[in-house]
Image (cartoon, rainbow, N blue to C red):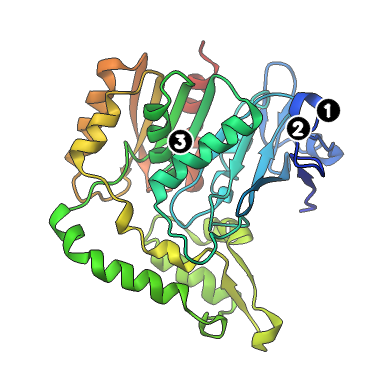
Amino acid sequence: MEEKTANVENENGESSDRDNSFVSISNSNNVNNSIGSRSLNGLIRNENSWEEVTIVVPWGTVQGKWWGSRNKQPILALHGWQDNCGTFDRLCPLMPAELPILCIDLPGHGRSSHYPKGMQYFLFWDGICLIRRIVRKFNWKHITLMGHSLGGALSFMYAASFPNDVDKFISIDIAGPTVRNTERLVNNTGMAIDKFLDYEDMALSKVPCYSYQEMVKLVVEAYDGSVDEECVQILLKRGMETAPQLLDRNGYHFVRDVRLKVSSLAMFTADQVLAYAKKIRCKVLNIRAEPGMNFEYPQVYEEVVETLKQNAKLVIYTKVPGTHHVHLVNPERVAPQINKFLLDP
């Protein structure tokens, strides 16, 4: 696919005045493919209806794919742990074409910058701060968030932390931040820190390289049935790159920051998650895949949903057959619920 790139800032680091904030680049190819979503106003979205965007942040850039009009505030879409924004590539063409969507690569994922050496990833806390940074940068109001897995947990945390700023959020196969056994987390803290420091000091020459087919096979096996080869190939478009010339090797390596593997330092207790759930006021759509993700404490999922119902304006909890990546493998199973939720006043 021919990819076009647009920066959301001008050379002075300020938002462009054109189109009220964002630079828009037309792509005449976007309206010629009949496969995709057709809205009531005649707009069509297909698999090519996006532009690469760059958001400047203090440590580098956050990259993303902007689907649809650049003249409206978009839905902000957030992917899962160690995935990238390509996870929404098959869902976005099925969503209303009049609703723009900004799918970003979280820091350390996809094409976004890694954190500098010396900084750690505290996934959930980092995510809240990143969303807030983007919202404040472009002065967005009445925000709509959509997230899968980690991205759904980040949407939950942001809606709880800034309850007056979020109108709606959609969470796919997760209710809130993942809850793990507290005693095991405590016992593994030292090991996790050592592992993080080992990853930080890993020489480039130690980074493994693979053939393309080897990479596909590795990811399919790592996801243990959640994705098929076709979906893995979609994720690898932003998830791999050719081996650096200095290594004098043929092949590819994963672009995500290896330090992301150390995620246990960011986990929550059930009491924390339920306390945040009580703060959420917006409309919520939670889509649970069946069998979906195998959680260590599956009962917490239902408890979070029931707690949300205490104060949120609306909570729609629905189940669809599929794997944890149902939105990528079978997007047609979740698109109708998502579209109705977004289009209903």
Image height of 254 relative to 150, above or below = below
Q: Which residue is mark 2?
A: 22
Neighbourhood count class around disc 3 (C-alpha, 10 Å): few under 14, some 14–19, many 20 upward: some
x, y percentage for residue 2? Answer: 80, 52
Disc 2 is placed on an element classified as loop
Mark 2 or mark 3, which has the lower sequence index? Answer: 2
- Rounded to the nearest whole Å, what is the CA distance between mark 2 and mark 3? 32 Å
x, y percentage for residue 25? Answer: 83, 38
Q: Residue furthest bottom?
A: 248
Neighbourhood count class around disc 2 (C-alpha, 10 Å): few under 14, some 14–19, many 20 upward: many
Q: Which residue is mark 3?
A: 333
Which residue is found at the position 36% from the left and 16% from the top? 314
Does residue 80 appear to the left or right of 12 in the view shown?
left
Which residue is found at the position 47% from the left and 77% from the top? 201
Q: Nearer the viewer, mark 3 or mark 1?
A: 1
x, y percentage for residue 311? Answer: 29, 16
Q: Residue furthest top?
A: 345
Confirm whether residue 249 shows in the render.
no
- Rounded to the nearest whole Å, what is the CA distance between mark 3 and mark 1? 38 Å
At label 2, the amino acid type is: Phe
Neighbourhood count class around disc 1 (C-alpha, 10 Å): few under 14, some 14–19, many 20 upward: few
Mark 3 or mark 1, which has the lower sequence index? Answer: 1
**Disc 2 vs disc 1: Cβ atoms closer than 8 Å?**
yes
Does residue 257 appear to the left or right of 297 in the view shown?
right
Disc 3 is placed on an element classified as helix
Q: Nearer the viewer, mark 2 or mark 3?
A: 2
At label 3, the amino acid type is: Arg
At label 1, the amino acid type is: Arg
Disc 1 is placed on an element classified as helix
Q: Which residue is mark 1?
A: 18
